[in-house]
Amino acid sequence: MTGATPRTITPAHEIASQVSAGARSARDVTAAALREIASGDREVHAFLETFEDKALRDADAVDARIRAGEKLPLAGVPVAIKDNLCLEWGKTTCASKMLAEFRSPYTATCVRKLLDAGAVIVGKANLDEFAMGGSTEHSAFGPTRNPWDLSRVPGGSSGGSAAAVAAGFVPLSLGSDTGGSIRQPAGLCGLVGIKPTYGRVSRFGLVAFASSLDQVGPLSTCVRDSALALSVICGQDARDATSSARPVPDFAAGLDEPVRGLTLGVPRQARSDANHPAVAAEFERAIERFRGLGAKIVDIDLPMTDHGIAAYYIVAPAEASSNLARFDGIRYGTRAKLAPGEDLLTLYTRSRAEGFGPEVQRRIMLGTHVLSSGYADAYYVNALKVRRLIKRDYDRAFERGCHAVLMPPAPSPAFKLGEKLGDPLALYLEDLYTVTVNLAGLPGITVPSGSAMVEGRELPIGIQLVGPAFEESSLLRIARQYEASGAWMGRVAPRG
């Protein structure tokens, strides 16, 4: 998939319109998506499981609902679901040996809402094990490859969800974002990816990584599709006490309003010398493009940005060590075999050693350490204080009149498979521009901006916008106007 000419695919909102009008059937759309997956996913490995028969039956049911007069905002749209979101059919593995055979008895609320809206779930997408990673190389079932260059990563942890769209298999997918896991792969794969405000989308049915940080959101080829999907999946859920009771607006309304008069803040930290030259150059072009659209650009300071990685890699592993304690081979998860005479402690330790991969084990050990007696005040409590200061930095920027903060989603384009596996810190630093958004609980969106030739390959580069809490509508409008200005728009990777 490294040919010279990028392709376009029919976006989700057009598919829904066509199916609703009877110009296409949901069955034909679904069958076409399944053929694309069958012919191309052997190289990419975006999917861990596909549901050919079930998807076609569901598509037939959508067609019947349309004939009965139902109005379905996602009628017949094929969707890929990250495999840490529960479904009542198939497996929910979290890309881990620990859950290799787990079958959920229920469906995640956000997925149920997609189904109610007429979407067709065609398969479960690969991810870094338990969503812990930034490259989708930490999957127990093998890495996903970036469709733009199969020797490179798609980002992570929602790399399978991103690759499924970037390869043209589906126009829409769901991922989860704990420290950038939607926005970073969206940037590396040339997609739109939005992390809503914490609490906008129910986490019921999302297998928890870090409960105070996790959020579900869509990835797509265009802003309008992400707005449409977000309108469907948001809303309060009695089964998630952290879900917000705020009314859900029509996020697609007002997308075409101009950004003239809006103020965008550019943090000095976003112009770091650590940025890849291609990222730095595209970021400056994006700033000038926004100026051309009539936006006011102001320089701001987010001084706690440089402490974000340290704070995140204390808070997130601490919550992970607690959440993953249930996977012990007794309550949940794969159970190791014991020899005669071996005790319960051996069963626990062996089950976890065999079930969890190296990255998950690393984070569990780190999280257990920072919560342990004698260290909690020095590490965990201080990290929570830094988290508050990070939120204060953003609040001050918005109080100054900034409607959004502009920065890259990652300091580099897609890197080579295996390039950073031997240096976990180097991989963690790829989250520099995304983790603070989760720590502050704010909405953030990545939108494609352009591309660069890196070692003879054309690689996508995105920009990221961060807004005040519950201001997704404003973010989507700004992103849409940027998209319409001639930035990289609606492209998927070439075949060849």
Image: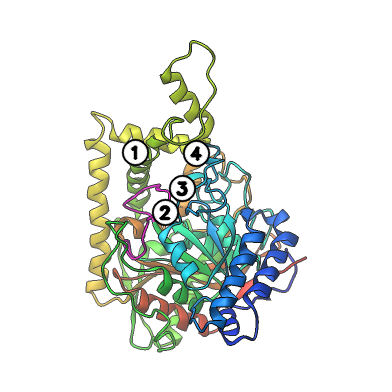
Residue in the picture at 26% in, 32% down: 375
Say which of marks 4 and 3 sits in front.
4
Q: CA distance from mark 4 to mark 3?
A: 11 Å
Marks 2 and 4, how far apart at CA: 23 Å
**Label pair 4/3, CB-CB below 8 angstroms:** no
Within the image, what quadrant is residue 56 found in?
Answer: bottom right
- Quick check: can you spot residue 282? yes
Q: What residue does disc 4 label?
A: 359
Labels 3, 2: front one? 2
Q: Nearer the viewer, residue 53 or 392?
A: 53
Give how far apart the Cα atoms at labels 1 and 3 are.
21 Å
Callout 1: SS: helix
Q: Which residues are magenta?
A: 197-214
Position above or below: 288 against 446: below
Badge nearest the viewer, 2 or 1: 2
Residue at the disc numbered 2: 205
Q: Residue at x 54, y 77 (%)?
A: 65
Quadrant occupied by the N terminus: bottom right
- Label 3 amino acid? Tyr
Marks 4,1: beta carbons within 8 A: no
Tell me the residue at 43%/63% (across/down). 110
Instruction: Write down the residue under mark 3.
Output: 428
- Residue 331 placement, left or right of 161: left
**How many angstroms separate mark 2 from mark 1 (CA)?**
17 Å
> Residue 16 placed where, x, y %?
56, 80
For badge 2, the amino acid type reads Gly
Mark 4 or mark 3, earlier in chain: 4
